Amino acid sequence: MAENVMEQIVAELRRSGSSYYPQHGELRNVRIVGHTPKNDHYIYDIVIDFADGSERLAAKVYRANKCGPQGSKGQARTEFNNLNTVYTTFQKKKLSGVPRPIGDFTEAGAVVAEKFSGLPLQSIIMKAALLPGYADHGTLTVAARKTGEWLHGFHRATADMPAPFDGTALLKDLEKLCDNCRGSGLDEAAVRTIIGGTRAILAKIKKPLHASAVLNDFTPLNVIVAEQGIGICDYARMSLRGTSFHDVAMFLAAVEALEKYPFCNRAITSQVQQEFLEAYGVGPAEQGVLRVLKMKALLGMFAQGRGVKESAVRKKVMWATVMKRFIQQAAERAMAPAA
């Protein structure tokens, strides 16, 4: 099915590809140079050859066998609309880091856009953890700061009226997540620390929170670091309105969760988080709510690990053991001082 979709995309790009790049000469060829299978989609790398150069595109093709033909069209349409909205907004405000959508292939269950060439931020963090001296050149520091600046620019460009803060609902969400994680061995001491610390922090929060479009999947794996700056390619889960700090907390949690790998120490993850927060512009009064939202994201990751297939029991047990220890340590660091 995906191969048939790619045949349609290639044929259309051969017909109309030159209209997107009038600065180039004659269009010579459209080539598929590789693909990456994901759980619910494929990513195809495409090269358009012109007489005086080449351009690279990425085609995301949703798997129809996962959600049916109409489902794949719906997913593609949602992502295309999100991408198109953000790209148009960024162009008006002269911001960068959002790929230009190319054509409309949503009826085929696909989204095509220009491709960013670079490294995922997570790969840079792992290199800094594994290669002595790699972080000394400032690569990691600059990447973390640029990431914070990009997200701040995204939230400012899509800003909406501040959202009232519902501390009661947030506390209930955390209590529910803690109950789910008890089944994987999260002990009562950690639960008490999390819930007690959350109550103390939420009692001090009175102001509404910044609202904007929210990516809902802003992690080091989805941040592409290139010579020309930061690029974000995935807008599938984006909401047009939400609490901006959800993206900030998700990023901080994803960075901190890398500590579950024995070679990725806290010195590295702390450096990334600190540089990111300074560049984003988080004030002292906002640190508390971020600690709560980050803990919520970490507990969500722990709960998701329980979804491993029963055939992979060993993997499931290892995940629970490692994440249980990690969550307990994270709770003591983030929540105990406020309890």
Image (spheres, rainbow, N blue to C red):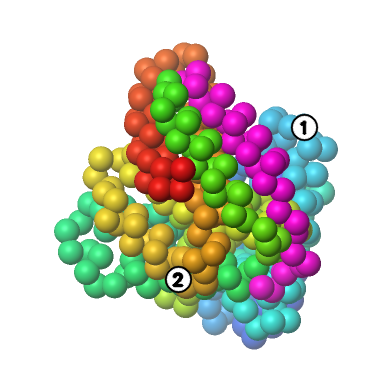
Residue in view at x 33 percent, y 66 percent: 140
* SS category of the residue bearing label 2: helix
Which residues make up the magenta segment? 156-184
- Decide whether residue 181 is among the magenta residues: yes
Q: Is residue 128 above or below residue 64?
A: below
Question: Which residue has dot 1 on it?
Answer: 68
Q: Amino acid at mark 2?
A: Glu
Graded by Cα atoms within 10 Å as few (under 14), some (14 to 19) or many (20 or more), the crowding at tag 2 reads: some
Question: Which one is nearer the viewer's eye here, 207 or 84?
Answer: 207
Q: Nearer the viewer, residue 31 or 323?
A: 323
At x 67%, y 58%, the residue is 206
| Whole-number angstrom distance, CA of label 1 to CA of label 2 | 44 Å
Judging by the rendered image, the residue that carries numbered circle 2 is 278
Asked if 250 appears above or below 207 in the picture, the reply is above
Taking 198 as reference, is 162 left or right?
A: right
Kindly identify the residue that appears in the image at 47 percent across and 77 percent down: 228
Residue 157: x and y in percent read 69, 74
User: Which circle, 1 or 2, is nearer the viewer?
Assistant: 2
* Image quadrant where one finds the N terminus: top right
Q: In front here: 184 or 32?
A: 184
Mark 1 belongs to which amino acid?
Answer: Gly
Residue 210 appearing in the image: yes
Horizontal and vertical percent position of residue 247: 59, 56
Q: Is residue 84 visible?
A: no
Q: Residue furthest left?
A: 132
Using the image as rendered, state which of residue 46 and residue 202 is in the foreground.
202
Other-residue count near label 1 (Cα within 10 Å), few / some / many at <14 / 14–19 / ≥20: few
Residue at the spot x=23%, y=52% of the render?
Answer: 130
Which quarter of the picture shows residue 162? Answer: bottom right
